[in-house]
Image (spheres, helix red, strand yellow):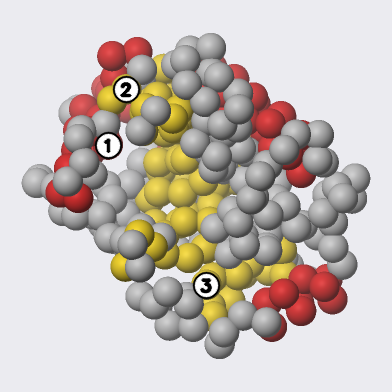
Amino acid sequence: MAYSIEQRAKANSTDYRLFFKDCKGHYISPFHDIPLYADEAKGIFNMIVEVPRWTNAKMEITTKDPLNPIKQDVKKGKLRYVANVFPHKGYIWNYGALPQTWENPSHIDENTGFGGDNDPIDVCDIGSKVCERGEVIKVKVLGTLALIDEGETDWKVMVINVEDPEAALYNDIEDVRRQKPNYLESTVDWFRRYKVPDGKPENQFAFDAEFKNKDFAVKVIKCTHAHWKALVTKNTDGGEINCTNTTVHDSPFFCKPTEAQAIVQAVSQ
């Protein structure tokens, strides 16, 4: 399915929002209404690009707002930007999230010993294309890194865009190690140090910062998908997370297209 985006307010402002529409032009939630799988039989997932490679603005799906548009994160009243930590420039991959996943903070991960970070699972696309913010791409899962961010489990799933010219060469995490020497090490270095310029300590990792393979990553994704399903059907308490959606018909948060349109029209132009 093709998706489109609609911008509200100016970029680099606290009012900026990027809303999503389906192929019929109806407003949707990227968190809840875009399917996790682009092709489940082939193991192809949908990825929502929040931050294009080489950019610095910390953009994210806002889980607490109706229809969950993308906005820039704010801390202490100021827009957040990721520093350039030598030798890196901004984000070193197309960075985003897998829809219909949720890292439940109440679920203590058996592998890490910590609860989830209360967000959709994070994804790093290693393909050569620099994507656009709000783009929905089809990806293959290659592996995952377990970041421990301020006492929370924050999985970072490594993927490649299926349309990448070299996608056929990548089917598991060892293919990345072989085809892109030092790329995984650079990824660990980036996640370890990116908050240091803000005065925070280096991040820590489970498994001594070793990447887990594709099968392990897919298992983690399926677990977070199950947690999302419980969240959107109100079988678990999501706290402040907004589950308004237009496609999950067994969800008590389901809304009609006219209601979704009213939500967007109430947001600043």
Q: Amino acid type of disc 1?
A: Phe
Name, please, the residue furthest toward the right.
250
Q: Quadrant of the C terminus?
A: bottom right
Other residues around mark 1 within 10 Å, as few (<14) / some (14–19) / many (≥20): some
The Cα atoms of the two marked residues, 1 and 2, are separated by: 9 Å
Which label was assigned to residue 205?
2
Q: Quadrant of the N terminus?
A: bottom right
Tag 1 residue:
191
The Cα atoms of the two marked residues, 3 and 2, are separated by: 32 Å
- Which residue lies at the image location 81% right of the left edge and 60% below the top edge? 246
Q: Amino acid type of disc 3?
A: Arg
Q: Amino acid type of disc 2?
A: Phe
The Cα atoms of the two marked residues, 1 and 3, are separated by: 26 Å
Element type where label 3 sits in the image = strand
Q: Can you give x and y, in whole percent of width and height, for residue 245 in the image?
A: 77, 57
Which label was assigned to residue 17?
3
Quarter holding residue 77: bottom left
Q: Is residue 96 left or right of residue 243?
A: left
Contact, mark 1 vs mark 2 (Cβ under 8 Å):
yes
- Which residue lies at the image location 63% right of the left edge and 67% below the top edge? 20
- Which residue lies at the image location 27% right of the left edge and 47% below the top edge? 92
Quarter holding residue 203: top left
- Which residue lies at the image location 40% right of the left edge and 41% below the top edge? 124
Q: Is residue 222 left or right of residue 175?
A: right
